Image (cartoon, helix red, strand yellow):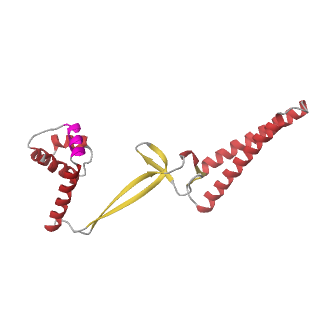
Amino acid sequence: MKTLLLRSESGYSYGHRSSRKLERALYHNVSFIWLMGGLTPDHKTIACFRKENRLALKNVLKQCARLCIKLKLIDGNTLFVDGSKIRGNASINNTWTKEKCAKYLVRIDARIEEILRESETVDSREQDSPSPVQMAEELADKEKLRAKIQRVLNELETTGAESVNSTDRECVKVKGRQGTHAGYNGQIVVECLR
């Protein structure tokens, strides 16, 4: 157990968080090979060990940091910064750029013209048909969408932003492991004290 604790701590100091990377280091990194005494546990064993001994690992890392401060190997006022991508409560489909607005406006204008032509054709053929009412409703929906997109486009032009999300104005496009989504890129700062 002590060997695996030391090895995990050594892995953290090298920036290895993945149990698979730690497993590979056992075959390539001399300090890892020496610490493990030639043992080569697989990534599953390493992951289970970390999960089962979380508190012990936390204590060893704290003791190591305190020892390094005491030996003046590191200062106690070191700041560690890490970014964290946080998903927003908005759809990526509601993120608008100038290009997307322009494309939608052209499509909406074409659809509005088509609706008006259909309405006129139906009106001329059938005076009592209920179709114009349906067309008028669809036309009103398209006009509302056109007005919404026009407001977004005006906002993009006045603020100079590359994109804006119509649901949550503060979120941005975030690229993460699960693809691109609307969210935030928060920065987390931790200070190492004595």
Instruction: Provide the residue span drawn in magenta.
Output: 42-52
Q: Quadrant of the C terminus?
A: bottom left
Q: Quadrant of residue 118?
A: top right
In magenta segment, residue 49: yes
Is 9 above or below relative to 67? Answer: above
The residue at the point 16 percent across, 38 percent down is 41
In magenta segment, residue 45: yes
Residue 26 in percent (x, y) is at 16, 42
Residue 43 in percent (x, y) is at 22, 38
Closer to the camera, 186 or 113? 186
Q: Quadrant of the N terminus?
A: top left
Residue 112 in percent (x, y) is at 76, 42
Q: Quadrant of residue 141?
A: top right
Q: Quadrant of residue 77?
A: bottom left
The residue at the point 54 percent across, 49 percent down is 90
Q: Is residue 49 left or right of residue 132?
A: left
Q: Is residue 31 left or right of residue 44?
A: left
Q: Is residue 107 left or right of residue 116?
A: left
Residue 155 in percent (x, y) is at 63, 58
The residue at the point 77 percent across, 42 percent down is 139
Q: Is residue 147 left or right of residue 79?
A: right
Q: Residue furthest top?
A: 125
Report the magenta stretch's main SS: helix
Q: Give the number of callouts.
A: 0
Is 78 above or below relative to 133? Answer: below
